[in-house]
Amino acid sequence: MSREYRNKLNQLLTMGTKNGLLFSEWLGRNGYSHQLIDRYRKSGWLTALDRGVMYRTGDSLSAFAALSCYNQQLGKNLRVAAHSALELFGFNHYVPMGKPKLMVAHSNLNVPKWMTSNGFDRTFKPFQTNMVETPETSVIRAEGVDLLVSSPEQAFMECLLLVPSQYDYMDLYYIMEQLTSLRPEVVQRLLEEGNNLRVKRVFLYMAEKARHYWHDMLNTDKIDLGTSKLQLTDNGTYINQYKITVPQELNDYA
């Protein structure tokens, strides 16, 4: 083993994120040729996950670390979203059965094939959303990596967007009851800019039902809720104020 080979290998193993991924495009920019990467693979130092995607042999793949590596190495902006983001902020109603899901939001992006691997500690559940032109996000440190995450305000609206494929209205209302500290100015912006009438109407209905103080600070006159009636369930209660038919269980819950 040459000194250059050994030095670059040590550097690679040091700068790689534990339990994360290494992308050949990023490695190339940092001085690692395809031939050198191939030698590391054949020597057993790196393991291929997909074409152009590797990890350090022996690592236990972390979905958080993989997502962080993808964003940082390739300049992407996939974000932890929906209930996965709410969990990072301390809001949770779900008790996962089996491997937990990691909800990942994207807009007009082909989901990378490596996300379909079952080798991660969480199952990636990517979904496309363009509810608002500029999502409300922040960066959170979790399990030793930096993650781009939907804000609680944005994340709850994403949950509503994914009913009924991923969530149930009643379960989401239990989470809404916990959201006592949402920022009214953020909620206002997202509702004004949002393009999904169902999400906006249900959000306001639930916030009012939960009697949150920040709901009273909203200027609903500036929020376009449309005029057509929306039926969320076949058998439910019609709420005239928001022109939606909600599940009977949700309407009766006090």
Image (cartoon, grey):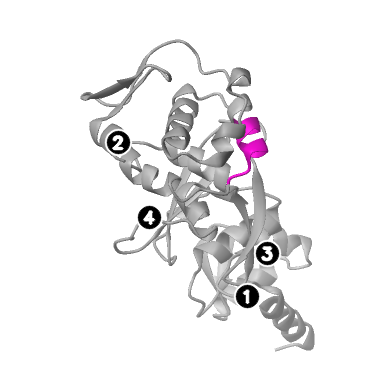
Relative to 1, does residue 157 appear above or below in the rendering?
Answer: above
Cα gap from disc 4 to disc 3, whole angstroms: 46 Å
Q: Earlier in the sequence, mark 4 or mark 3?
A: 3
| Highlighted range, magenta | 182-190
Residue at 70%, 76% in the rendered image:
12
Q: Where is mark 2, residue-wise?
A: 250
Instruction: State the separation of the CA atoms marked 2 and 1.
Output: 60 Å
- Viewer-side label of 4, 3: 4
Q: Are marks 2 and 1 in contact (CB under 8 Å)?
A: no
Q: Amino acid at mark 3?
A: His
- Label 1 to label 4, Cα distance in Å? 47 Å
Q: Are marks 1 and 4 in contact (CB under 8 Å)?
A: no
Dominant secondary structure of the residues highlighted in magenta in the image: helix
Mark 2 → mark 4, Cα distance in angstroms: 16 Å
Q: Earlier in the sequence, mark 3 or mark 1?
A: 3
Indicate the amino acid at tag 2.
Leu
Disc 4 secondary structure class: loop
Mark 4 neighbour density, 10 Å: few (under 14) some (14–19) many (20 or more): some
Give the mark, 3 or 2, whose residue is nearer the N terminus: 3
Q: Quadrant of residue 164?
A: top left
Q: Please give the residue where the numbered disc 4 appears in the rendered image.
A: 93
Which of the pair 29/248 is nearer the observer?
Answer: 248
- Say which residue appears at 55% left-offset and 35% top-offset: 215
Q: Secondary structure at mark 1?
A: helix
Identified at 75% across, 87% down, the residue is: 2
* Mark 3 element type: helix
